[in-house]
Amino acid sequence: LPPPSVEKTRSVGRPRKLQALQLALEPVNSQAARAYARLKQKLKQLHKPQLDCRRSIIQGIPGFWAKTFVNHPQLSSMISDQDEDMLSSMIDLEVEECKHPSHCCKIMLFFGNNPNFWNEVITKEYLININGYRVFNSTVVQWYQEYKCEACSRRHHNSSPNFFNWFTDHNFTGSDRITQIISKDLWLNPLNYYKRTKSLEEGAERTGTTQILNGIQWSIRIYLN
């Protein structure tokens, strides 16, 4: 065995070697992160046609997103009848995620004309870390005057985790779960939660819409995972 003085000298030198190694790794890690971001962007562009096609098909199905949200087993209990009415005017959903320079997630809900608010797009942006999702930007809902009082009343009389509070209050405690469900599950495969009516199924069989959407969805899910 080496004498204690030699072992002590080695112990003192190891943290310095570790620090030097860590400094050498930092530019490599940065380079890898940039390369990953470029690859992710390239894949995103390659799959844009599928996403555009999916969007076009979904916009041709009235009330698609309202049914998708309501039929999700973890969201259904958090969506009221008023929320469903509000969601009935939703025409599109987009989720974007990036990991460089920071891990961020952006959710965009697109709406057509509706009796509740002016906004055509509601955007929510989050920073993602080990503690969950922290919102850093959220669109303020511009309510119509005749609906503003009802919206305020609903927000103050129900503080439980629900879709309306997530939609209207960017500082709402407990919104992480809803954000995660939308970004990591519902958006990846909305068709999985859409309950088709008999008439729509029959029409889809004639036109092949369901088969087309399923094929597109499979391609998109492979890319996103």
Image (tube, helix red, strand yellow):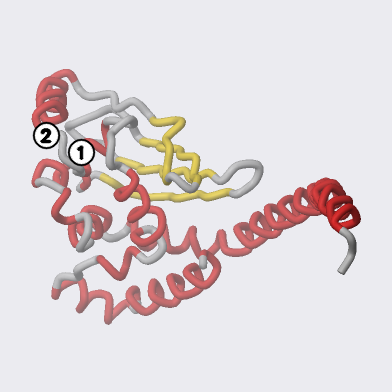
Image-based side of 93 in relation to 160, left or right: right
Q: Is residue 176 above or below residue 159?
A: below
How packed mark 1 is, by other alpha carbons closer than 10 Å (few <14, some 14-19, many 20 or more), is: many
Type of amino acid at the residue the image marks with label 1: Phe
Residue at (15% x, 23% y) in the render: 152
Residue at horizontal 57 percent and vertical 63 percent from the top? 47
* Neighbour tally class for label 2: few under 14, some 14-19, many 20 plus, Cα within 10 Å: few
Do the residues bearing badges 1 and 2 touch, measured as CB atoms within 8 Å?
yes
- Image coordinates of residue 155 in percent, x first then y, are 16, 29
- Which residue is tagged 2? 158
Query: Eyeballing the image, is 105 above or below 191?
Result: above
Task: List x then y, in percent, for residue 106.
Answer: 47, 43
Of all residues, the one furthest to the top in this rendering is: 145
Residue 135 seen in this snapshot = yes
Q: Quadrant of residue 167?
A: top left
- The quadrant in which residue 198 appears is bottom left
In this view, the residue farthest toward the front is 3
- For label 1, the residue is 164
Front position in the image: 11 or 6: 6
Q: Secondary structure at mark 1?
A: helix
Where's the N terminus, which quadrant? bottom right
Residue at 45% from the left image edge and 38% from the top image edge: 125
